[in-house]
Image (tube, grey):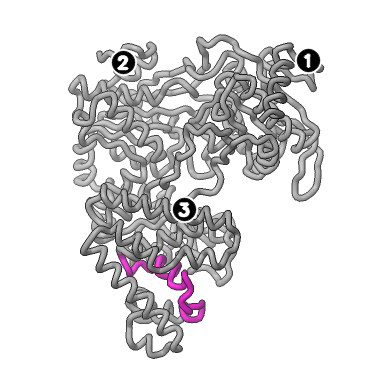
Amino acid sequence: MSKSAIKLNPAQHAAVTHIDTPLLVLAGAGSGKTRVITEKIAWLIDQGHYGAREIAAITFTNKAAREMKSRIGKRLGRKKIEGLTISTFHSLGWQILRSEPEAAGRRKGLSILDQHTSGDLIREMLPAGAPKDMVYAVQSGIGRYKDAGLNVEQAHAAAKSENAARAAEIYAGYEERLAALNAVDFDDLITIPAKMLEDPVLRTRWRHKLKYLLVDEYQDTSEAQYRLLGKLAADTGAFTAVGDDDQSIYGWRGARPENLVSLKSDWPNLEVVKLEQNYRSTGYILTAANSVISCNPHEFEKQLWSEHGPGEKIAVVEYADEADEAESIARAVVTEVHGGHARFGDCAVLYRSNFQARAIEQQLREYGVPYVVSGGPSWFDAREVRDCLAYLRLLVNPEDNPAFMRVANAPRRGLGSGAMSRLATYADATHKSLFEAAVDPMFQAELPTQAQRGFRSFTNMLIDFNDRAERGDIGEAYAEMIEHIGYLEWLIETDDDPKKADRRRRSIKDLTGWVERLSEATNSADELIARVSLAAGPDDDRNDGADMVRLMTLHAAKGLEFSRVWLAGCEEGLMPHTRSVDEDTIEEERRLMYVGITRAERKLQISYARRRRRGGEQVETTPSRFLDELPEDAISWPARHGSEEASAEDAMDNIAALKAMLEG
């Protein structure tokens, strides 16, 4: 066995070296699962069981894929891992789909519509002025039908609510539009390949190509992802699934922790290895986590333990209101840092809902604490990024209808809703793309002069830059295109907020720079567009390692760890969320609490407020039921147990912190 793998504990060693049957690794929080996957890949290659090209490791995020790629590259060297597949589910699905698009009823050169663009497509099919909530509900409903493998007729039969019925109504037309655009949406990247692999010839080909599978975060797989993996796995079950049923917190987006249980029935010879030794947290933190999660039913029992010693008891603190809570957290962060116990970057404040961040941000600013908010709106959600990505799609393919519709009048070219509506009607009637219709002399002749000029200017610009991109470097052509149209200047003119202008300037600069780098690393325009559509974005982890306090939702915190953690707002209605009580998904909320507790390495405070502003007024609150599930011997709860005197060390730390603030 390799020198690196000798350092594995017995359970990790068993997981790495098991190969005879399918394997499920139940990896508790902080138990070193990424290392197990990395070492297993190395072991499979070193021992000659499989070549690098025959192995696929599948993750859920681009960031996780990059980290795994980096680790295995350092472990074995680049040459030894040449051809190794490490990708997200969606990237793997894209590989299958683009290799034989005809098998999916598509043509070569197909494109991927991101969530925003597919939402725009759905909006066009709904009544004029349909609210965002309706668009999202229909989009989610169609996604659920696809995930379940339902066709249009089955979707109609399964619809039990108004939103579900509306989604079923739109489903057929939406699929027709996608086919006409030679496009797929994100759900299709899983569901279509799973369907394609029902063909025995295609299935055999891909099983021969990918002979061993390793799947991370298996508890987060959806119904369609489970089908896809089942089709890819050889009959012998040459796979390792790694997951933790206690950390399944994405049920609202289709994750099915029961997929872990299904493995046992679908693969009767499944071996199960439990990783229970935690390398992250101290004893009291793990005792609390084990106690809370034990209140959920379990198919697989496990108990986290650590060699780090008991550590400090968890502080459970009651505050008067959210302002009091936020001020105390900010002060505690300053005390930790100026007392020499931590850096700002070692500290995290976690909460259930994004709105809770506002009060905490205000207090951190008051104390001059550097911070970053994670888990909020994506960089891709920014209007300027979405517009500029539409221009990139048009640069490669001027006949991309959703992109054309989005930016034909951004910047303004005199193409208002009337002109665009007439264009869409003409394009539908003549079975042309919007671009083809816009350059059609017969259509142009029907337009007022201003609209004629607007369409002519826009389409001529697209033709010019499309020609430049085909003859030269697409990255350079794109940067020139964005500068040529004066997009940033137009945005700044329409919004006089200087801070917003700076942010938009940086976003556009980051985007064009990112596209230029990608263009150098890809072999075709189609591949470039696919990489952009599948990637998380250039700023996915730009603040990793920065000496700043992290503010984030519990969902965003999964997979991360911090020396000092403050878990705020543990009240009924927030944690667990009211919706989970109404929908009877308390078990998932308890798993969310477990995830929050296990983010802490050395020190954890859990807090609640007696009153909190909700819907514009202060309301009385009740401490979360999960606090009653914490073991008495692992917590310090002054409001319940009586006040405790501050230690001399705490007092000195407070004095030092205040002195540092005054001198700073």
Residue type highlighted by circle 3: Ser
- The quadrant where residue 432 appears: bottom left
The percent position of residue 421, horizontal first and vertical second, equals 47, 78
* x 24%, y 48%: residue: 199
- Helix, strand or loop status at disc 2: helix
Question: Which circle, 3 or 2, is nearer the viewer?
Answer: 3
User: Residue 61 shows which numbered tag?
Assistant: none
* x then y, percent, for residue 105: 28, 60
Which is nearer the N-term, disc 1 or disc 3?
3
Nearest the viewer among 348 and 13 is: 348
Q: Is residue 259 magenta?
A: no
In the rendered structure, which segment of residues is drawn in magenta?
397-420
Along the line of sight, the residue nearer the viewer: 454 or 577: 454
Residue position marked by numbered label 3 in the rendering: 507
Three-letter code for the amino acid on which mark 1 is drawn:
Glu
Please name the residue that numbered disc 1 is placed on: 644
Q: Nearer the viewer, mark 1 or mark 2?
A: 1
Q: Which mark is residue 5?
A: 2
- Separation of residues labelled 1 and 2 (CA atoms): 47 Å
Question: Closer to the N terminus: mark 1 or mark 2?
Answer: 2
Q: Quadrant of residue 569?
A: top right
Tell me the quadrant of the picture where the N terminus can be found.
top left
The answer for how far apart the CA atoms under marks 3 and 2 are is 43 Å
